[in-house]
Image (cartoon, coloured by chain):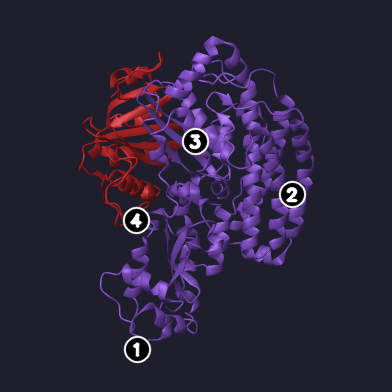
Amino acid sequence: MADPITNPATPEAIFGKDAVTAAMADHIAIVGLADFITDAKWDRQELTLTVAPETIVAACEAAKSAGYNFMEDVTAVDWYPTEPRFQITYSLLSHTFKQRLRVVTRLDEGQSIASITGVWPAANFYEREVFDLFGVPFTGHPRLTRIMMPDNWNGHPLRKDYPVEGYR
Amino acid sequence: MSETSFIEEEAVSTRKTPMTHETGVKDTTGTTLAGFRPAEDLVPSKVGTQTAEDMIIPGVEDVVEESLGGHKPHGSDPVSDQTMILNMGPQHPSTHGVLRLVIEVDGETIVSLAPDIGYLHTGIEKTCEAKFYAQVTPLTDRIDYLCPMTNNTAYALAVEKLLQLEIPERAQYLRVLFNELTRIQSHLVWLGTHAMDIGALTVFLYCFREREELLRIFEAVSGQRMMTSYVRIGGVSLEPPLDLYAKIRAFLKSFPSKIEEYEGLLQNNPIWISRLKGVGYLSAADAIALGVTGPPLRASGVDFDVRRDMPYSGYEKFKFNVPVSNDCDVWARYVLRMQEMRESVSICLQALDGLPEGRIVADAPKIILPDREQMKTQMESLIHHFKIVTEGFQVPAGEVTSSVEAPHGMMNYYVVSDGTAKPYRVHMRNPDFATLQALETMCKGKLIADVVAIIGSIDIVLGAIDR
């Protein structure tokens, strides 16, 4: 299974923390999140920074003070059977700099991640959706219940090992 | 089964301990009508000063629990201490689809409110993972069914970014043209239903008269009235029929006078003014904290429009104003959307005037289906056609986000490819989903009738929320 974080796609793409940091040293996200970046890529004019799951709240706060004032989206990608399995993707936007930043982190199955509702209350519904459809628990979320599926549903539909058709 | 039994069942099912009829919600229905609280006890005084931190949306259970916590046995306390749970939807006409709201009311004042969604969840994101890239386009129509062209554009932009595909200018202009016509169409549905919720039925009929003209234009260009699938990966699907430009021009010529007609019915109407002005206050800080985008964000004084600030599909070539208001209420959102329709007319005219000649699809025979004529006469085209239809086309691995300004707000498509012919993950960030989070903030301390006005003003489509 090809992994977009490490798999080169376009000739102008830059991969790896050191290469991206060197090429875009004065970028507000690279400066603001310098302490948290574990991996980075610049691909198709989009910047993706990987951070460790335990530092996600601190990283989001750093991004917010760096100028990314708006939380657009929280979602997940299931890279089953690759380990760690889940990629949580946070999409941030700066109204001032008119830039978008993608912060990603990787989680094993059953591993939980801190909720960022303290930084942006807008993450509330999005984290509930990820919990519902992927089964990733968020600690510190004000109400982590299913949002799309009925409360008594078994399984998490957007996982790759959940069948597309047939009986559950 | 009495009429109130559904409400009662809801309350019982979401409560941890069984509830008896003596303390049930039913008993409060008769009594709260008489008990008004003194004005200083009501929540509205606090509304303006709330900060984003204490605005975490409660769940349905929270609302029910909170109300039962403060509830004393029937007859032993002043009725003014009691609150009542009201279930609104999912089949309520003013919720614009299958939105269910559980509302705690004190008299007629909203104490807390919880949206309950998921009634229209169809698993489109899961379905996308089982389709070829080109087969996903018709699925995107069904998400925000009032602006199919915009959904198509957002998805096409994401896949084109993955493929690093250059789109011919003519296709870009056609996309802009139909995106803006879609914006007018979506705003017409918003205005019609919003006015109907407030009680002005005439406006609804007028709006749908003009919408009909637009749907005929969409039908002429794509063969479908609503689920157009017109914007495809690599360009647009068909060359518009020759007389269509004249039809669009005729529509654009008459439409500004129609906007004036709607305003003549509404702008100075005392009922319309008193129902809209000062209702549904949402400060700029709260709007940003709660993820609100599009017209509601601009009505709260944040000057951000994806079309102007992060242009896509050639929007940088067009001149238009982005209306912004600092009033932060339902009235501001109404005025702003009316203004947006006028701006859309101007963008459409610019697109028609500047429409360049040339191809309507990118030059990529392995990605875009050849035209019928070529396929039947040339061996090469036949092979491409066969390959694309049976195996799809491979997309280089990567992850991209495309962002467009949909009629309801900022719409993002997040597409992840693993190098095969089917998307590994497609995620839609719809504006409606985030805007719904701000509903409680806007409704707290207002009346039930205001909830209806506020839902109308945030302009949600449940297909986009539940996906």
Q: Are marks 1 and 2 on the same chain?
A: yes
- Whether residues under marks 2 and 4 lie with C-beta atoms below 8 angstroms apart, the answer is no
Measuring 22% from the left and 33% from the top, which residue is drawn there?
A84
Residue annotated with mark 3: A96
Type of amino acid under label 3: Thr
Q: Which residue is mark 1?
A: B76
Secondary structure at badge 3 equals loop
Q: Quadrant of the N terminus of chain B?
A: bottom left
Chain identity of mark 3:
A
Q: Please, what is the three-letter code of the amino acid marked with disc 1?
A: Ser
Residue B351: give x, y in percent of width and height: 69, 29
The answer as to whether the residues below labels 2 and 4 share one chain is no
Task: Answer with mark 4 or mark 3, whichever residue precedes in sequence.
Answer: 3
Which chain letter matches label 2?
B
1 and 3 marks on the same chain: no
Chain in purple colour: B
Which residue corresponds to mark 4? Answer: A150
Q: Are marks 4 and 3 in contact (CB under 8 Å)?
A: no
The amino acid at mark 2 is: Ile
Compute the Cα span from label 1 to label 2.
56 Å
Q: B318 or B17: which is nearer to us?
A: B17
**To which quarter of the image does residue B302 belong?**
top right
Q: Residue most toward the front?
A: B376
Which residue corresponds to the image point at 41% horizontal and 72% vertical from the top-left? B7
Chain coloured red in this rendering:
A
